[in-house]
C-alpha cells in the first residue's frame, strides 16, 4: 500500500516559481520576530546522518569526538546507533553516505584550539580554525565522509 505524501513545509509546483511565498495571516506571528505563535523551537534534539559502517562511526563519535552511545535506541529494523554529544544527539543510520554538498552539523566546544590540538595529536585531519561571526570554527570529516563543524563562541553574543 502506498503511503500518502508527507508535507515538506515548502512551496512546490507553479507557486514555487511564479509567486512570492505566502505570508501567514495577520495575527499569526509575533510582532517584529516573524516567529509563529504555534512553533517555538527550543533546541535541536538530534541530527541523523548516514554511515555505511555503524561500528566505525560509533568508534569515531565516541572515541574521537567524546560522545556517549545511548542504550535506548529501539530496533527499527536497520542498523544504527544514537550518540549523545553535549545536550544534543547524532543518530547514525546504517546507509550509504550522500555526496558532500555543504551539508554538515556543528558541535559547540569550549576551547577550539585545545580540541584541534588533541584531534591532530590523535591523527585526525582537522582544518585550521577561522573566525566567523561571534566565534571560530573548523571542519573535519567522519570516517564515512560526513562533514562535522567544531564551533567555539568567543564572546557573549548568541551562537549563530
Image (spheres, rainbow, N blue to C red):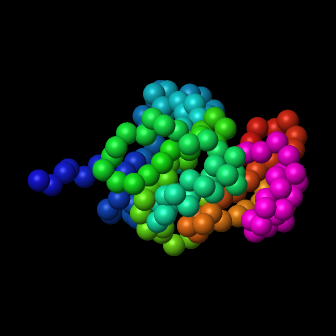
Image height check: is 58 above or below 34?
Answer: below
Q: How many marks?
A: 0
Residue lying furthest bottom: 99
x 60%, y 66%: residue: 143
Q: Position of residue 157 (x, y in %)?
A: 82, 38
Residue at position x 19%, y 51% in the image: 3
Can see residue 142?
yes
Above or below, 89 against 8 in this view is above
Residue 104 image point, x, y percent: 61, 59
Residue 108 forms part of the magenta stretch: yes
Pick the residue in front: 95 or 122: 122
Q: Position of residue 128 (x, y in %)?
A: 84, 65
- Whether 19 is among the magenta residues is no
Occupied quadrant, residue 145: bottom right
Q: Please tell me which residue is depicted at 73% across the width and 45% down the height of the picture.
A: 108
Identify the residue shown where x is 32% and y is 63%.
14
Q: Is residue 34 visible?
A: no
Residue 147 point in image, percent of width and height: 63, 63
Magenta-highlighted residues: 105-129
Look at the picture and state if 94 lies above or below 154: below
Question: Relative to 127, is 10 on the left or the right?
Answer: left
Question: Is 46 or 25 nearer to us in this picture?
Answer: 46
Q: On the image, which quarter does residue 140 sit in? A: bottom right
Q: Is residue 113 left or right of residue 1?
A: right
Q: Is residue 26 above or below residue 60?
A: above
Amino acid at each position: 500500500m502506498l503511503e500518502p505524501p508527507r508535507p515538506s513545509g515548502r512551496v512546490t509546483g507553479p507557486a514555487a516559481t511564479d509567486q512570492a511565498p505566502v505570508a501567514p495571516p495577520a495575527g499569526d506571528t509575533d510582532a517584529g520576530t516573524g516567529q509563529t505563535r504555534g512553533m517555538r523551537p527550543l533546541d535541536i534534539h538530534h541530527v541523523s546522518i548516514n554511515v555505511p559502517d555503524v561500528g566505525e562511526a560509533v568508534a569515531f563519535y565516541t572515541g574521537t569526538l567524546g560522545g556517549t552511545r545511548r542504550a535506548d535506541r529501539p530496533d527499527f529494523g536497520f542498523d544504527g546507533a544514537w550518540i549523545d554529544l553535549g545536550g544534543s544527539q547524532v543518530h547514525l543510520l546504517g546507509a550509504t553516505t550522500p555526496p558532500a554538498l555543504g551539508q554538515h552539523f556543528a558541535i559547540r566546544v569550549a576551547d577550539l584550539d585545545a580540541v584541534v590540538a588533541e584531534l591532530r595529536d590523535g591523527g585526525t585531519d582537522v582544518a585550521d580554525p577561522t573566525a566567523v561571526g561571534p566565534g571560530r570554527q573548523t571542519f573535519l570529516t567522519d570516517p564515512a565522509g560526513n562533514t562535522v563543524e567544531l564551533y567555539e563562541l568567543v564572546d557573549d553574543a548568541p551562537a549563530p
